[in-house]
Amino acid sequence: MSVQISPSILSADFARLAEEAKAVEGADWLHVDVMDNHFVPNLTLGLPVVESLRKATDTPLDCHLMIENPDRWAPAYVEAGASSVTFHAEAATAPVRIAREIRAKGARASMALRPATPIEPYEDLLPELDMLLIMTIEPGFGGQPFLDIMLPKIRRTRALIDKHGLDLWLQVDGGVSAETIERCAEAGADNFVAGTAVYGADVPAAAVRALREQAAAVHRH
Ligand code: DX5
Ligand code: ZN
């Protein structure tokens, strides 16, 4: 299991997105939180900003869609330049169709679960996905405290991935920091979103390296 870090630009300065994207070059992904003020009580950015970010950085874009009707919108985010597109299980009408459309357009397909959504009903869908995102906060805002109550779900998800022998990344998002990343890694996560912990640091690229090293040390043991 190799560790991947995906800094979330939600915690960056939105008036300087190009510079902020460059500040984390060396990260595996740039996590882009798309919010529509319906699925979550916050509004961020959409397709035109993703298109511009694509031109502003070489880091692949990991688009996390916190929007209603991802059936309608997810494929367009691949066209806009996302290399990975995550839709929410709770918002999707036809998750298998969405995942297949994302893959057909050439990106990695990922599905997210809010804290109250269990993994078990989705066991049979896992082969359709390249990544599963377990929210470790209620989605909508950065800077919220990590929900330790999600650790058992991370463990159960890792067990399902292993049971089926799948090459599926397990991402965690929300409150991931130097204080919490080891717990996530120990529970079986291998892809870590971090907003405040990266962009709140004096040197964001150094924070990415430190988080990666902490998680990798857990996986080595
Ligand atoms: C919130 C977003 C997260 C957010 C995480 O709904 O999905 O990606 O940026 O921010 P931190 O790392 O500060 O919890
Ligand atoms: Zn996110």
Image (cartoon, rainbow, N blue to C red):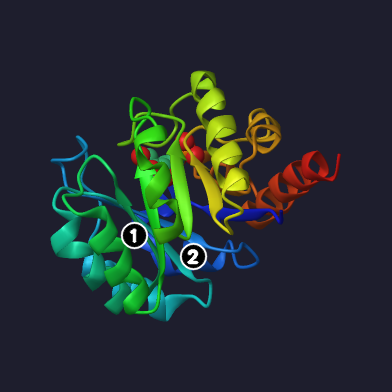
- Please report the residue visible at 53 percent of the width from the left and 63 percent of the height from the top: 29
The image's mark for residue 120 is: none
How many discs mark residues in the rendered view? 2
Q: Amino acid at mark 2?
A: Ala
Q: Residues within 10 Å of mark 2 (few under 14, many from 20)?
A: many
Where is residue 204? Give x, y as percent: 62, 52
Mark 2 and mark 1: span between their CA atoms? 12 Å
Where is residue 215? Give x, y as percent: 73, 43
Quick one: 60 or 14, which is closer to the camera? Answer: 60
Going from N to C along the chain, the mark reached first, 2 or 1, is: 1
Element class at badge 1: helix
- Please report the residue visible at 43 percent of the width from the left and 77 percent of the height from the top: 56
Q: Which residue is mark 1?
A: 15
Q: Amino acid at mark 1?
A: Ala
Where is residue 143? Give x, y as percent: 45, 32
Where is residue 66? Give x, y as percent: 26, 47
Relative to 75, does residue 11 appear above or below in the rendering? Answer: above
Q: Which residue is mark 2?
A: 21
Left or right: where does residue 187 sit relative to residue 51?
right
